[in-house]
Amino acid sequence: MPMNADYRGPIELPGTIPLFPLPGALLLPRGQMPLNIFEPRYLAMIDDAFRDGHRLIGMIQPDVSHGGGVEKAPLFKIGCVGRITQLAESGDGRYILELTGVARFQVEEELVVNTEYRQAKVTFAPFADDFIARKGEDEVDRRAVLQALTDFMSANDLKADWDDIEKAPNEALVNALSMMSPYGAPEKQALLEAKDLKTRAELLVAITEIELAKKNIEGEPQLQ
């Protein structure tokens, strides 16, 4: 999704951002995430994002393993900020929007704020490479990624648009498959925190192979 803003490095993003804690949600640079916003606190967050002109929302997972529920649980330290690139009003009080990923961030400090939604002081400096589109594509084992996808689709009796998949550049392919993967919060966080595209691709393949092996052990037909 094209953006009107051109972010060329960490310095061009604000140091304080609003946070949207969402378990199992994974946003990656240049990936697209649809969201259906209906809670008053997050409706206010969207309004404020437009009011301040940045249109940026920090997607991050709450670490619910420590208790507290989604809203009060401590947050993982790494998330990804996205810019609102599409917005529609539903007519019944909801916002239907799409975020386009910009760059990952590291939480330095969650702030005490008057807003009902959470905010944090963050740094983008550790993820300067996120601003470089398609960086590291040549190092991705595309064949292994496609084989893992083929095996997963076959094992779950799913179909895919292979014409579009074959045309997708490696970055778009790996990040889209990571974002759409049906894995749990720890796996999604590991994919988010992968140091580069090659590592993310290898991790995606490894997680998929582990899940397929579990499926076979549980009595499902073996993949041929």
Image (spheres, helix red, strand yellow):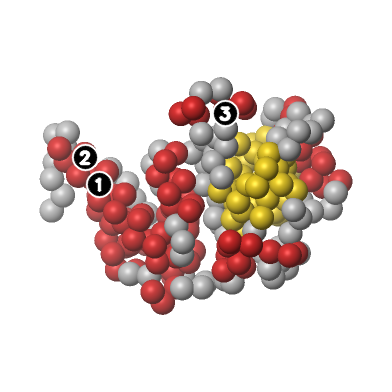
Q: Are marks 2 and 3 in contact (CB under 8 Å)?
A: no
Q: Is residue 68 visible?
A: yes
Residue 210 circle label: 1
Q: Which residue is mark 3?
A: 73
Q: Name the N-terminal-most of marks 2 and 3.
A: 3
Kind of residue at disc 1: Ile
Neighbor class of circle 2 (other Cα within 10 Å; few <14, some 14-19, many 20+) is: few
Residue 187 circle label: none
Q: Residue furthest bottom?
A: 138
> Disc 2 or disc 3, which is closer to the eye?
3
Q: Which of 210/36 is in front?
A: 210
Neighbor class of circle 3 (other Cα within 10 Å; few <14, some 14-19, many 20+) is: some
**Which residue is painted at 82% across and 41% down in the image?**
48
Give the x, y percent position of residue 123: 66, 55
Kind of residue at disc 3: Ala
Q: Is residue 89 left or right of residue 136?
A: right
